[in-house]
Amino acid sequence: MTALREYEPAPGRLVEWHPTESTSDSLGEAREHPAPPSSFQENHLRRALANDAAGAVHSPWLATAFDLPGELDPVAMAGAWQRWVRRHATLLTWFENTGDELRRCALDAADVAFAPVEVGEYGSGADIRDHLLHRFATATSALSWPPFVLGAVLRPESSTVFFAVDHAHTDGYSIFLVFDELRRLYWEQITGEPAELPEVGDHADFAALERGREIGAEEQAAAVRTWSEFWLEGGSRPPSFPLPLGLGDEPRGKLLTERELFDAEQATAFGKRCREHRGSFPAGVFAALAIAAAELAGAESYRTLTPVQTRDEPRWAAAQGWFVNLVPLHFSLAGLRTFGEVLAAADEAFVRARAIAGVPVVKLVEMLGSRLRLQEDARTVLPIVSFIDLRRVRGSELWEAAGAQVLSGPGEGFDVPMWINRLRGLTYLKASYPDTPVAAENVARYLDRVQAVLHRVLAEGDHEFRGAAPLAAVE
């Protein structure tokens, strides 16, 4: 995960793939699609519209970049892009804002084709980065088609492929799937060897099912109870970073920081330590986050929002789309003094959270109205802590050699969302934070403490802490 502002590919010849003239002509014959946006899609699009209206800096897209060996064949890649976009039907759709509703439109897959367009020779990676910053910001809206940018930097020894798309059509897991599928489809174009990709469903079908699904009384009651406990525990406020961030009245840009938590051997050993305490690896990481909050800020409970996948049918497993729900994770630290005890509490909280994963939080907020004011400002993104185990994603063993990156854009920082990704050889934590000296200092101190807790557990099997004796925070 890399901020696009810090990304500089090697120089080379820049090529993009644009819809052919016949594809552009077919936009005039596009049909209205019967599926509504999913709950998360609508919330995302409304947030993007609110940011646009306020003139706020935001990047409502996700992107990936990776290398392929040799100089790319632009015509063969055009065929690969065509196959891939047609395969993931959400990429054939866009939304029209009527004011009262967001209406989905769609192209027929048979009408979609791409042709290479020479952008130019670039002598520096910084110039390429600046081009991408502009293109991703201006050409990825889900309110028009195409909602994505397809391109590559060509060189004799290797080529860097990039893809950016509005978040409405992908999620943090889907974007990792692009590498293997596109690589296979390109190789098929070059050699004729079948790509052998799994069948996938259409996220628009998922959205229709989600919006039309009736939530049973028991399931709804469990969701309301879990969310109410979480909400009241935090004084009817969303969770926030435990230390001061130095935020004033003016918007702040956001910065990224990264910590390597474990190499492959250490991750295996930490997982064993967690099992010795009858807990899971993810719960162990969340336990360390909670302990750091207790030791540095005197936190008496841990509260966060964590994404869970909603790919509950085989057809969604490899599909592009936003297959995510947010669930509340919270547990008390009162009376707990060891990592093992906190891990047990974190594991129990995971069980409660997973039990309501089928109830979309956006739909729940609609049902509860003012009783759950999670997002009082439509422009803001709720702070989350995400954990994804990516070791079994097809092609992940090749990511490092291919320089695979997930790219993020500029925006305004209000809190400290975190993403913990477990790869085959590395488990790392990436955090976004507001661009203030106070935030830089306190986020660094917090992440230092998280690392210290994890590695003490790794070395000694447990960690004793005093939750009632916080250190002074930087103000």
Image: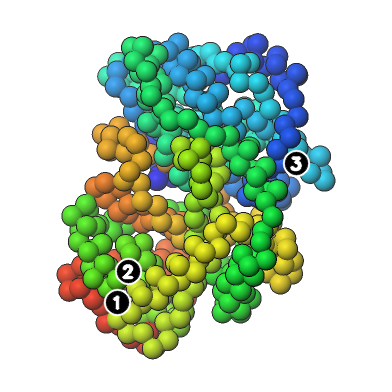
Q: Amino acid at mark 2?
A: Gly
Q: In the rendered view, does 149 fall on the left or right side of 369?
A: left
Label 1 or label 2, whichever lies nearer to me, is 2
Please tell me whether mark 2 sits on a helix, a strand or a loop: loop
The residue that disc 1 covers is 340
Residue density around tag 1, few if under 14, some if 14–19, many if 20 or more, within 10 Å: many
Q: Is residue 455 above or below residue 70?
A: below
Label 3: element kind: strand
Q: Position of residue 317 (x, y in %)?
A: 46, 40
Look at 74% across and 35% down and name the residue there.
34
Q: Along the horizontal axis of the image, is 339 left or right of 414? A: left
Q: Earlier in the sequence, mark 1 or mark 2?
A: 2
Q: Closer to the camera: disc 3 or disc 1?
A: 1
Q: Do labels 1 and 2 touch, CB within 8 Å?
A: yes
- Residue at 65 percent across and 21 percent down: it is 108
Which of 370/54 is in front? Answer: 370
In the structure shown, which secondary structural element does the residue marked by tag 1 occupy? helix
Quadrant of res 334: bottom left
* Distance in Å between CA atoms under marks 3 and 1: 48 Å
* Nearer to me, 394 or 427: 394
Residue at numbered disc 3: 102
Give whichever of discs 3 and 2 has the lower sequence position: 3
Pointers 3 and 1 in contact (CB under 8 A)?
Answer: no
